[in-house]
């Protein structure tokens, strides 16, 4: 017959086995959910990182473009100032000679350069310079050297002017 004392250990063992299977199933399900949550979190972090990097690149480009535009405008202003000075030099003299003629030529060329810069935006200037560099590398290097010297002198003059203004205010 059925001995209840004998069936009790089997029932307890079966209950323990069933409980262990339930724990294992729940553990497996929990592991799957944790893995899915981790995968989703990693995807979210990657998407956010990509978005932030894209924003940073765009912001950097905008800042560089703004700074280049400010430099272009400053250079146009400086060149126009040089044109004014050369104009004053050539008009306020009664003498004719090679120095006056050279100053007039320089004035005309600086005026042309200022107009050229003023009529173009930064990408156009870059494209023009690349095209010139490919077509005539020697002329490009010479022009770059002259522009560098002119920019240095212009910068030095602007700094000296600001230094004089600051000293006069104190």
Image: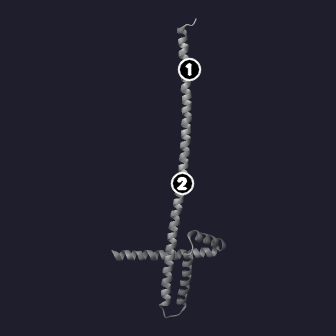
Distance of mark 2 from mark 1, alpha carbons? 53 Å
Q: In percent of the image, x 54 and y 52: which residue is there? A: 51
Above or below, comparing residue 18 to residue 57 in the picture: above
Q: Which image quadrant for residue 157?
A: bottom left
The image shows residue 145 at horizontal and vertical percentages of 56, 75
Q: Secondary structure at mark 2?
A: helix
Above or below, comparing residue 109 to residue 20 in the picture: below
Task: Check the image and name the residue furthest to the front.
Answer: 1
Above or below, comparing residue 155 to residue 20 in the picture: below
Task: Check the image and name the residue furthest to the top.
Answer: 1
| Res. 114 mark | none
Above or below, comparing residue 33 to residue 143 in the picture: above
The image shows residue 12 at horizontal and vertical percentages of 53, 16
The image shows residue 150 at horizontal and vertical percentages of 52, 77
> Is the C-beta separation of discs 2 and 1 under 8 Å?
no
Local crowd size for mark 1, using a 10 Å CA cut-off: few (<14), some (14–19), many (≥20): few
Task: Check the image and name the residue furthest to the left.
Answer: 170
Q: In percent of the image, x 56 and y 31: which residue is there? A: 28
Residue situated in front as seen by the camera: 51 or 110: 51
Q: Which image quadrant for residue 20?
A: top right
Residue at mark 2:
53
Residue at mark 1:
17
If you read the primary sequence from the N terminus, does the residue marked by circle 2 or circle 1 appear first? 1
Local crowd size for mark 2, using a 10 Å CA cut-off: few (<14), some (14–19), many (≥20): few
Total numbered badges shown on the rendered structure: 2
Residue situated in front as seen by the camera: 49 or 151: 49
Q: Secondary structure at mark 1?
A: helix
Residue situated in front as seen by the camera: 84 or 28: 28
Q: In percent of the image, x 42 and y 77: which residue is there? A: 161
140 relative to 62 in the view: left or right:
right
């Amino acid at each position: 017959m059925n001995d209840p004392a004998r069936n009790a250990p089997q029932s307890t063992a079966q209950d323990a086995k069933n409980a262990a299977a339930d724990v294992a199933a729940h553990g497996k399900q929990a592991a799957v959910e944790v893995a899915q949550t981790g995968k989703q979190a990693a995807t979210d972090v990657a998407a956010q990182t990509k978005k932030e990097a894209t924003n940073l690149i765009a912001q950097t480009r905008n800042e560089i473009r703004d700074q280049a535009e400010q430099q272009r405008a400053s250079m146009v202003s400086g060149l126009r100032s040089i044109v004014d000075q050369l104009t004053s030099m050539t008009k306020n003299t009664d003498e004719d000679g090679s120095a006056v003629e050279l100053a007039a030529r320089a004035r005309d060329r600086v005026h042309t350069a200022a107009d050229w810069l003023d009529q173009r935006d930064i990408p156009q200037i870059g494209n023009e310079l690349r095209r010139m560099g490919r077509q005539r590398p020697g002329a490009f290097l010479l022009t770059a050297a002259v522009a560098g010297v002119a920019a240095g002198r212009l910068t030095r003059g602007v700094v000296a002017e600001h230094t004089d203004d600051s000293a006069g205010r104190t």
